[in-house]
Image (cartoon, rainbow, N blue to C red):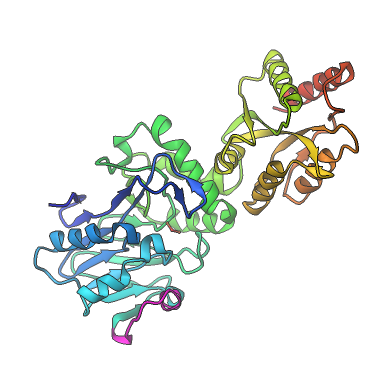
Amino acid sequence: MYNTKKITDDLFYIGSDDYRLTLFENIHPIQKGVSYNSYLLLDEKTVLLDTLDWSKGEEFLAKIEQVLAGKNLDYMVIHHMEPDHGAMIGEVLLRYPQVKVIASKQAFVFMKQFGFKLNEENMLVVKEGDKISFGKHELAFVGAPMVHWPEALVSFDTTTGTLFSADAFGSFGTLFGRIYDDEFDIEKELLDEMRRYYTNIVGKFGMPVQTLLKKASGLDIKMICPLHGPIWRTNLGLLLDKYNKWSTYEAEERGILVVYASMYGNTERAAASLASKLVDKGAKKVVVYDVSKTDISTLISETFKYSHLVLASPTYNAGVFPLMHNYLEDMKALSVQKKTVGIIENGTWACKAGEEMIKALGEMKNMTILEERVKILSSMNEKNAEEMDKLAEALVKSL
Ligand code: FEO
């Protein structure tokens, strides 16, 4: 027996948790793992909604067989063709050769690129506005291009008010038995991994997410079934509010994120000194990270979260410290915007880090760089202490 869950009388969760994978997309650490979600609808016609990652293929096929209990599989909807959801298409086709695959035109192009062999009779192309009835249930298809791939579709079950949302509204983290949002403590167990997933995977595409949210606002949504993380049936308001903030690059919290790089501890001491002054001057939320010790996906997530940012870096190879450079490049790539930024630079000779950081920030939208800057020559001196006071004052004033 394989673990499946009945969501409604005729809709089943047949996803799997992956706690063995260390890096999602071979780049983002997932200490809490990830779930790949798939759903199976048993109506007059049977409908599989997306597949799973190859690593979970064996149990996935067994789960389909278990839930179908002797029925045939009539349809397979592919909302999104990235291999963590589309990898099992070929295996499903082998076992259920008569199945009709429903996907966008571009998803079929991608399927062929990934090497799946589909016959014309297996393919049913859908686009925005198309509706297909499977008996009691009707799916209305809605385009979600660039959330976060161009072929993405979502579908809305008009009978039950269920949105099958592809990667939108997904999260890192395993489920292990709890499949609904209300079975988690959202603040303690979900929010950080939701934000880290959104900002690193979808964060670049704020405008397309806004377009999708506008389309979703016209639907009477009762439940959201994403391809990662829990099914949302209770705290939909919270979820939509977070997505609206993240996709408009508005901070969730007025607070100061200090990210520093330090080779021998002098810039670290400067960052610590600033943090202390900020707290003394009344800042309620100050968080400090060492860029060399913190995964960049966490830094990005925290950058989206807070309104203010301080970057402190030594000069390295006549530029900024390499890991700080990577962080800035990632900020740029993920469209980070709307921050008030303070700069602390260090250099024993030819101090260049500040100039480089300001140049990179200048390539992002709506970044306010404070004029009060701290320039350290090797280690903090009395002049730096005064500069630091002024920077702390300016940051707290602008909170
Ligand atoms: Fe979870 Fe874009 O694949």
Magenta stretch bounds: 108-121
Q: In which quarter of the image is residue 167?
A: bottom left
Total numbered labels: 0
Q: Which residue is drawn at 32% across and 54% down?
A: 37
- Determine whether, in the image, residue 322 is placed left or right of residue 143: right
Q: Residue at x 36, y 55 (%)?
A: 227
- Determine whether, in the image, residue 358 is placed left or right of residue 103: right
Above or below 8: residue 87: below
Q: Where is residue 140 in the image (x, y as percent from the top left)?
A: 34, 66
- Determine whether, in the image, residue 253 is placed left or right of residue 33: right
**Foreground of the two, 296 or 212:** 296
Q: Which residue is drawn at 28% across and 70% down?
A: 76
Q: Position of residue 166 (x, y in %)?
A: 40, 58
Q: In which quarter of the image is residue 152?
A: bottom left
**Foreground of the two, 195 or 374:** 374
20 falls in the magenta region: no
Q: Where is residue 291 in the image (x, y as percent from the top left)?
A: 64, 36
Farthest residue in the bottom direction? Answer: 120
Q: Where is residue 362 in the image (x, y as percent from the top left)?
A: 79, 48
Above or below 396: residue 330: below
Farthest residue in the top direction? Answer: 280
* Ligand 1 shown in quarter: bottom left
Q: Which residue is drawn at 75% across and 23% down?
A: 270
- Determine whether, in the image, residue 129 is placed left or right of residue 339: left
110 falls in the magenta region: yes
